[in-house]
Image: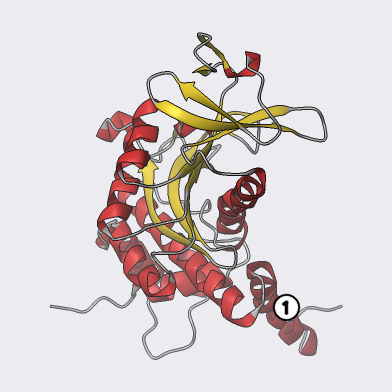
Amino acid sequence: MTQPKCQDAAYIDFLIATPRAASCCEAARSQPPSIDPPAHDAYTRLLHRLEPDPETLYQEVEPLVNKNQGVLVLDDSTLDKFYAKKIKPVHRHWSGKHKRVVMGINLITLVWTDGDRIMPLDYRVYDKPIDGLSKNDHFRDLLNKAKLRGFCPKAVLFDSWYSSLDNLKLVRDHSWIFLTQLKVNRRVDLNRQGYKAVADVLIEPTGTIVHLEGFGSIRVFKVVSPDGDIGYWATNDLTMNEVLRLELAEKSWSIEEYHRALKQCCNVERCQARSARAQRNHIGMAIRAFVRLSWHFFTKGISWYEAKTAIVREAVRSYRSAPLYGI
């Protein structure tokens, strides 16, 4: 059997190095000199040959994390595909970046962080028309997998989209602590006065213990932003104080940093392949590219943005030392 010319490591290195163009043709054009370099077809076959499996990501990440430390953060992000009418996993999704519904691929990721390292553990591509699974189904699947892998985090962090009763009960059943945001109309009961919207209940600055309808006792914190917006955070840790809540809330932003770097430094949105298999493989290898940049950041103190820029800077320096174009 003929061995494939192109392996996943070569494609991951390409995604890290290329500034913008992330096509198989460009991967072949930028291939280092060799006797028989792979053509663009080899990269295309790579994207269609591999089995899309998040387990490959976890095998690389497992030695880099501490299962008994840190927190787990879960959220989703829409990968822009404005003009991709014939790409299989593309559907209409809400985009927090554009503040409207756009065409794209919705990526759900479970991230581990201890405040210094940010490491994606697992991910799912939301494709309900094909697999019939909702975002909450993926949420529970990701947390169940983390439990089986032996994780015992200090807390599980997620936003109000995933704060359904089934999800909250799952975290509690795993003997984990959650910290999530609540929508203003979630019904709670303070001192047996009857259920009201959480926005209509007096919440102390240090947090107030209330009964969440259908769940049980939780501690709720009211947070007022500098621009006057009011938000509500809830946890099943009834002893949590505002200092700990603030510390955990800051760590929850790590997944936003991850999403930004994944798009800006790893070219996760730039695959032009039409098949769902190729898109999933591209996404998986882009996430593995982020792992390499994140580990470099942790060990060398060089941010993923600077690491990416340094590659381009060296190419610019090389050109300026021997310009090809002139008058």
Percent position of residue 156, x then y: 46, 47
Residue 109, relative to residue 12: is it above or below?
Answer: above
* Residue positioned 38% across, 75% down in the render: 63
The relative height of residue 121 versus residue 129 in the rendered view (above or below) is: below
Judged from the image, the secondary structure of the residue bearing numbered disc 1 is: helix
Please tell me which residue lies in front, 98 or 277.
Answer: 98
Please state the horizontal and vertical placement of residue 253, each as a whole percent of the image: 61, 50
Name the quadrant of the C terminus.
Answer: bottom right
Badge 1 crowding class, 10 Å Cα cut-off, few under 14, some 14 to 19, many 20 or more, is few
Write the residue at 72% across / 86% down: 318
Q: Residue furthest front?
A: 191
User: Which residue appears at 66% of the width and 43% of the height?
Assistant: 242
- Is 131 or 103 nearer to us in this picture? 131
| 111 vs 158: above or below | below
Query: Residue 33, position in %: x, y?
Result: 48, 88
Q: Place residue 254 in its image quadrant.
A: bottom right
Q: Residue furthest left?
A: 1
Q: Residue furthest top?
A: 194
Dividing the picture into quarters, in which one does residue 204 lie? top right
- Quadrant including the N terminus: bottom left
Q: Could you say where residue 129 lies in the image, as x and y percent from the top left?
A: 31, 29
> Which of the pair 32/262 is nearer the observer?
262
55 relative to 211 in the view: left or right: left
Q: Is residue 26 visible?
A: no
* Residue at which label 1 appears: 313
Q: In the rendered view, how is the structure colored?
A: secondary structure
Q: Given the image, on which type of amino acid does mark 1 rest?
A: Arg
Q: Is residue 225 visible?
A: yes
- Is 311 left or right of 26, judged from the image as shown? right
Q: What residue is at 80 percent from the left and 27 percent from the top? A: 228
| Of the pair 164 and 300, the residue shown nearer to us | 164
